[in-house]
Amino acid sequence: MKMTIFLLLNASPGWLRLSRAERGRIAAAGLEPFTRNGLSLRHFDAEAFHADCSDVAMIEAETPEAYYFAIEQLRDTDLIAEGYFTITGIIPSFENGFRTYEAAHAV
């Protein structure tokens, strides 16, 4: 089953002080692990609507290992290592997982 993981992120003041061009460069390098190995990434801005996180990343992964390895790589990038973002929550899920369960168990 394909996993969908929601990362709740909070941008630091240091991130916000960077120019938009510099943010784009750092983000492109940091998010590169999510462009391969059966992974996909979507980004959602939340700062105007939520006080606990500024951004939500939705990651789809074919395997838990692909997701895990990408997170390990992310931790080594400036996005996390330099403190530009903190991960405030992780919500792993399976889209319509109950349907897959029911089909497998003929309920």
Image: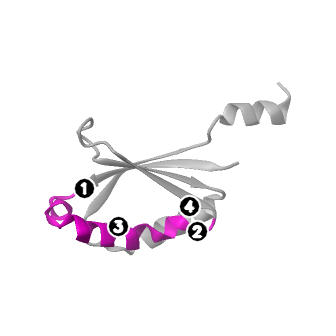
**Mark 4 and mark 3: span between their CA atoms?**
18 Å
Residue bearing the label numbered 3: 27
Q: Nearer the viewer, residue 54 or 28?
A: 28
Identity of the residue drawn at 83% across and 36% down: 104
Name the N-terminal-most of marks 3 and 2.
3
Q: Is residue 89 left or right of residue 38?
A: left
Task: Check if residue 96 falls in the magenta segment.
Answer: no
Residue bearing the label numbered 1: 11
Identified by mark 2, the residue type is Arg
Q: Nearer the viewer, residue 20 or 45?
A: 20
Identify the magenta region.
Answer: 11-37
Judged from the image, the secondary structure of the residue bearing numbered disc 1 is strand
| Crowd band around label 3 with a 10 angstrom C-alpha radius: few (<14), some (14–19), many (20+) | some
Counting from the top left corner in percent of width and height, residue 8 is at: 37, 48
Judged from the image, the secondary structure of the residue bearing numbered disc 3 is helix
Residue 36, numbered circle: 2
Name the N-terminal-most of marks 4 and 2.
2
Identity of the residue drawn at 54% across and 63% down: 68
Identified by mark 1, the residue type is Ala
Residue bearing the label numbered 4: 67
Mark nearer the viewer, 4 or 2: 2
Counting from the top left corner in percent of width and height, residue 37 is at: 62, 68
**Mark 3 and mark 2: span between their CA atoms?**
16 Å
Identified by mark 3, the residue type is Ala
